[in-house]
Structures are given as structure tokens and as C-alpha cells.
Amino acid sequence: RTGAREYGAHNEDTSVNQDSLWHFFRMAAVLHNGLALGDMELQNYTVDARVALCMAAVRQNGRALRSVPREMQTLEIVEAAVANDATAAHYMRDPEVAMAILLERPELLRYEPLDLGGNALRNIRRAVLQRDGSAFQHLPSLDRTLEYLRLALQTFPWAINYWPADRHL
């Protein structure tokens, strides 16, 4: 015996709990297409059910991270998303999680998080460049400023090679 009836919690009259059944179908949808998460309202679920749906979605398609609410973007969920698709880094919303991810994977700087405020992004870039100046090469060309170059040169003297040719020092 398999199927949704067994997945759902049974009431005393052996009928299937409707919430469990809907969760089953939503889980099946995100396992098939992670981007389906964007069409779901998650607020009615328990925290565990929401985490499970979000994790399943980003494992299937990393870009589903754009539909994961900020408060649900844990280190584990974001790591799973960028492991599946590096461009998912665009959708990181939590500055602390983004800092942890980018310190470990500075090459993701090329996928600038779109929803982080200017100060948060600047602080993250500074921290990453102070730790690993070679990350300078991963900054978008327009964001390669003299300030960032100076930070990068402290640990990576070859960062100068990544200064845009059309700009003077």
C-alpha cells in the first residue's frame, strides 16, 4: 500500500487529515519543480513543514531561494541552494547568512545579493576581501573600487591584475 492516504494523518473515522494531504501534494510539487514554492502560501504550516518544503525546493532548483522568506533562509537552506545553483546567491536576504556563505565561497561575490542593503553588502565585501584578497577578481567590474583594491592587496598582491583597464588608479 502506498499513496497519499498513508502519508496523511488518519482521524478516528479513518479519513485523511486534509492538512497532511495538502502538504503531501505541495511537497510533491516542489520535488518536481522547486520554483513551485513561489506559488505557495507558507504561513499556515508548522515551522518544520515550512523548512522541509523550502529545503526540498532549493535542492531541486537553487533559484527557488528567491521564494524562501528571509526568516527561513538558514545557513543550511542557503548552502543547499548555492550548491545546486551558484546564481542562487543573488537571492540571499539575511546578512549574517550571506556573510558566512561568502566567507567560505568568495567566488559567489560575482552573484551580488539583490536584496541586501548597501551597508550590509559593503561590510560583507570588506570582510571577504580582508580575509581573501583574491576574491577581488569576483567582484562585478563596476564594483571594483579603490577601497576594495586596497583591502585585497593586503593579502593578494596580484589583485592589481583585476583592476579594470578602462580606469586609472
Image (cartoon, rainbow, N blue to C red):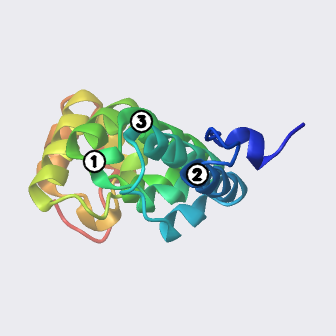
Q: Position of residue 147 (x, y in %)?
A: 11, 50
List the residue tagged with mark 1.
71
**Residue at (52, 39) in percent of width and height:** 80
**Please, which residue is most extreme toward the right here?**
1
Q: Separation of disc 1 and disc 3 at Cα?
A: 22 Å
Sequence-earlier tag: 3 or 2: 2
Residue 153 appears anywhere in the view: no
**160 vs 132, nearest the viewer:** 132
Element at label 1: helix
Label of residue 105 in the image: 3
| Image side of residue 101 versus residue 60, left or right | left
**Residue at (53, 47) in percent of width and height:** 53
Q: Position of residue 122 (x, y in %)?
A: 15, 51
Given this view, does label 1 or label 2 mark the residue nearer the observer?
Answer: 2
Task: Say if mark 3 contacts mark 2, CB within 8 Å.
Answer: no
**Residue at (28, 34) in percent of width and height:** 157
**Type of the residue with mark 1:** Glu
In this view, 68 is above or below 103: below
Q: Separation of disc 3 and disc 2 at Cα?
A: 34 Å
List the residue tagged with mark 2.
23
Element at label 3: loop
**126 vs 49, nearest the viewer:** 49
**Type of the residue with mark 2:** His
| Image side of residue 88 versus residue 14, left or right | left
